[in-house]
Image (spheres, rainbow, N blue to C red):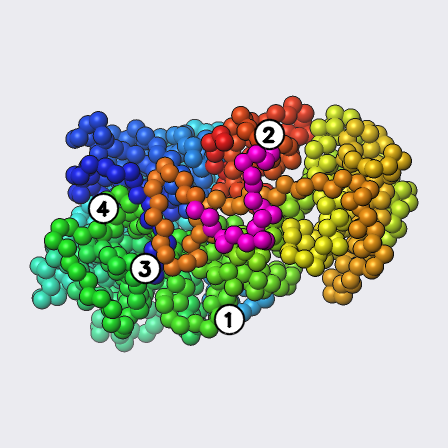
Amino acid sequence: MEVVYVCEWEKRPKNNHCPSIPLVCAWSCRNLIAFTTDLKNEEDDKELSHMIHIIDTEHPWDVYSINSGHREVISCLEWDQSGSRLLSADGDGEIKCWAMKEHLVNSWESIQSSSVDGDPIVALSWLHNGVKLALHVEKSGSTNFGEKFSRVKFSPSLTLFGGKPMEGWLAVTVSGLVTVSLLKPNGALLSASESLCRLRGRVALADIAFTGGGNIVVAATDGSSSSPVQFYKVCVSVVNEKCRIDTELLPSLFMRCTTDPVRRDKYPAVTHLKFLTRENSEQVLLCASSQMGSIVECWSLRKEGLPVNNIFQHRSPVVGEKQPMILKWRILSATNDLDRVSAVALPKLPISISNTDLKVASDTKFCPGLGLALSFHDGSIQILHRLSLHTMGMFYGSSGSSQRVGDEPAIKRQRAGGPAVHFKALQFSWTSLALVGVDNHGKLHMIRVSPSMGQLLDMNTLLRHLLFLLEYCMVTGYDWWDVLLHVQPGMVHNLVEKLHEEYMRQNQALQQVLATRIVAVKASLCKLSSATAARANDFHAKLLLIAISSTLKSLLRPHVLNTPDKSPGDRLAEICTKNTDTDIDKVMINLKTEEFVLDGPPLQSLQQLIQWVGDFVLYLLANLPNQGSIVRPGFGFLRDGPSLGMLREMMVMIRIWGLLKPGCLPIYTATSDNQDSMSLLFRLLTKLWLCSRDESHPQEPDETLLDECCLLPSQLLVPSMDWLPINDGVITKIQSKHQLRLQFGKPYTLPGLNPNSQMEIFSRSPASQRMDNLRCLHMGICPTEESKACTRCGCVTMLRSPNKTNAMKQWEQRWIKNCLCGGLWRKIPNT
């Protein structure tokens, strides 16, 4: 483990924070982190700043601080399963739901709230949506994604008509109330509260888990280690438009340290109570502490046979009668005496813990999802095995180093006189390859966690582990930023190739679903190395090409309604694949041109997208003779048969539309007045496509094609394609072992990749034109329009639409929530 970056606030006066205030932190599946700090308001020395801070991990300095309006200290933060909404709860019983304003990660607003007046919230969770995956390490070598990541039968907490999961949240209060708020489809909120049991008592700590049958389990303790830890089953239903809550007492447990005569009074307080995973209510982690130290225990709920008294032993058994069974908590494991624990982080990766999966994980040294993290008051972190509680790895915060168990520390840690810097909140990423911690000075630390916990791995095994987790992110749609933390520049090429091989082994339906996602993953990987940076631009161009192609094809309508099963777009693709003629007009003859008849305004409004297609074809062909020099953007397309075929289809479509509305045609600057530019480009494009359409046996372009492409710059003015800007995030800057020191509110501007001749293609001079990468429009040298940029790829587009026509608005609506690559949008300041 090592610190990747530390982000701190501007220098503040001493004693500007309250050490007694607990901090909370939450990490979403979209790699957004929400956290609180214990800093005081500068105006009022007594008042705490009840702010929620939200960052995306790629631009940690770009913090968005919400003045939450909570009157008391914020006690809980919870992201929903999509990672786009956030719940916050406080010590006054108020719960607020936050959502992105205009789908921007640095702009949030409260959309709903509920309250249990004056009753502090101790546990909070969204209701379960019924989606649960299991990740099988045993099947990591399988060719089928469905075997590696299987869907587990799991019921939602509450369903609407037709089995659709109902959205809402559930909270537990200090006084022993459970409160539920349901979001109705019309936006209204349906709330109810109920006592956990008849004899209400104080609840100092609680946690919430879900069962496969749709029930909710709440664990609660009054904070004393000599009191029992109680468990309750909670059922939520809607009866006559009213929310109903039913509760039932389940078996409880006493911590083992209180029954041990040596430790009976050593650890008086329970400081942490957590279910090991949200979807497993049968395993719980407990931590009891004193001022000097802590002890951690892991318990499991088992079914056991009820012993029958001897009197009944000899009674003749009824046919089919079984021994009565009861549920009982049994201790799985416990640690020895530890330093005082300050925070606990549990893994989110849903790794299967069957015996075979655990054995394969142990043999291959695959550790993600198997370790839980404990941070201590001396600033260190230990990773323990989630079942055996054996130490898997150590991290010493003071020196920033880490080591494996059994290694002797190189330098004995010096204990400072004052309180040591330690983590008050700790969270794992969704693949367990990174940890984020907020320390007692309000600094945010990003820590890289090795997939083998520091054990030596050969390169092939490490690549296989990273590939397995990239595939998991691809299937689930989760962000893969934390996997990229472990990819060194030398691994990029192999990972891209292996990922493509695995993708090609999937069935056709799954390939269609993942078609754009895999291109986005490849683009992210290629940005990590200067040798493959040009390919990253190819992958982004491919995403734009796929999007434009599907948009233009969606405008086509069948001439008569009772047409066979193939759409006009499918027929166009089929005819263009079969017809290898280099004359564009001969290919047009075979098409039903009435299906291409559109009104003028939509065609004219899409001219900028059509122009991009025309420019891109010209750029590719003009650069075909240069392919032997340094790898330029566009090089990947020269061997990509499907993409060249897609360009060919669009050229035919544009040619037909040009007959109806000449104004929509791409504009070329030709040296000759009678030059048919589209016909020339289509002829050369077809020849290039014929060389690469058979992917198993690609051919080299012949000399005549290369000669004709050499002449293109003398016949047509070749455009300079505007590739995506160099990513301004941190991922390209943290391959080295040196941690970055960042400051909230101040952008980090050091160059990432080593500047060399290959990177000159992407460099921008201050006087260069800025592009709207989505609308393919020039915005000028100093744009005055507000803009937003993708957190993942850096794609820039205007925040407000300059277009009035429906066709262009339809294009813009596709990218209102996410970028082409699936990344989130953030508002960027005007240049």
Q: Give the range drawn in magenta.
A: 750-770
Foreground disc of the pair 4, 3: 4
Whether residue 350 appears in this view of the structure is: no
Compare marks 2 and 1 and give the one earlier in the sequence: 1
Can the viewer see residue 338 in this picture? Answer: yes
Q: How crowded is mark 2: few (under 14 residues within 10 Å), some or many (20 or more)?
A: few
Secondary structure beneath label 4: loop
Marks 2 and 1 sit apart, C-alpha to C-alpha, by 48 Å
Q: Which of the numbered marks, if any, corresponds to residue 780? A: 2
Label 4 to label 3, Cα distance in Å? Answer: 21 Å
Any magenta on residue 761? yes
- The residue lying toward the viewer, choosing from 126 and 580, is 580
Tell me, yes or no, whether the highlighted magenta stretch contains residue 685.
no
Front one among 702 and 214? 702
Distance CA(mark 3)–CA(mark 2): 51 Å
Given contact means CB atoms under 8 Å apart, are the residues at marks 1 and 4 in contact?
no
Q: Which residue is drawn at 57% across and 34% down?
A: 767
